[in-house]
Image (cartoon, rainbow, N blue to C red):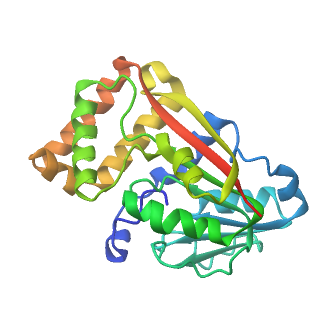
Amino acid sequence: MENSAAITNQDSTSKDYSYLKLQNRLFRYIWSSDYSAPITEQLQKGGKVLDVGCGTGVWVTEMSKNYPLCHFTGIDDLPIFPQDNEDLTPNCTFLQCSLIDHLPFESNYFDYVHCRNAHMDFSASAWRENIIPEIIRVTKPDGFVEHCEVDEHYVNEGPIMREITNALTSYNASLNIDGMIGERLDEILLRTGQLYNIHHQQKYSPIGGGWGGEFGRLAIDIFAGKCRIMRTELAEEMRITPQEFDQKIKACINEAESTRTYLKSHRVYAQKLA
């Protein structure tokens, strides 16, 4: 969902989601691909693909260009994806709908269902009782589902970053959101009893431009972008003013130049039992 569902439709017009497109570029660097499931042959032949929580729609638009015989559908509960854009390929569609309810598709409809960066958009119970069951329902037998999530906490955090991520953890806990659900997605999928061939892959990537180069700088910019989206909530959690929070973000960016911090991301894919 690219971390957008917690914001209301009214708020979405004033939020800066530009970091989401940077995020797509970072994931491609980390994973050297736009997906991990072994579906290339299927995509080349054609099929139906769903992106749950498509955010700005960048994954859908780029995949639709790479695989013109497939039809890609992106859904989100915020209309921040392209709308009436002449540059869109004819094989992609975007739809605004609630992701917590029954998805507006027939059962066994999609060959591949993709969901990325949605861990902060749903409670732990919603993941287990709504999101994952609906993703499985709309997937064809033997079709693939794939999730990609980044851990809420980073490896080797500096003190300022730890202060911010601790505030994020506390805020998420009040909403029953599991910011480390990526660590457990394979177990959650296994417990459904409806999936097989479950694979869980993990990657580490530097955050901070001083030692991480171009993509380390990209990662810290994305971190700052995410934090600014939640500026009001996190400032309140930290009991500081929004202006003081802005200064924390600036200090965190500088701190990351020397702490050699890593982000940890997960990709989990599986097939639906016939």
Nearest the viewer among 13 and 50 is 50
Q: Quadrant of residue 3?
A: bottom left
Where residue 227 appears, as percent x and y from the top left, is: 31, 47
Q: Residue at x 63, y 65 (%)?
A: 136
Residue at position x 21%, y 34% in the image: 163
Is 157 situated above or below 219?
above
The quadrant in which the C terminus is found is bottom right
Where does the image place residue 10, in percent across and percent down from the top left? 33, 76
For the question of whether residue 165 can be seen, the reply is yes
For this orientation, the residue located farthest to the right is 45
Which corner quadrant of the image does residue 254 belong to? top left
What residue is shown at x 32% (from left), y 71% (from top)? Answer: 11
Q: Is residue 34 left or right of residue 222?
A: right
Q: How many labels sit on residues?
A: 0
Q: Quadrant of residue 186?
A: top right
Can residue 121 be seen here? The reply is: no
Task: Tell me: residue 28, above or below residue 258.
Answer: below
187, above or below 68, in the image = above
Residue shown at 30% from the left, 57% from the top: 176
Q: Depth check: give the residue in front, 85 or 76.
A: 76
In percent of width and height, residue 69 lies at: 86, 66
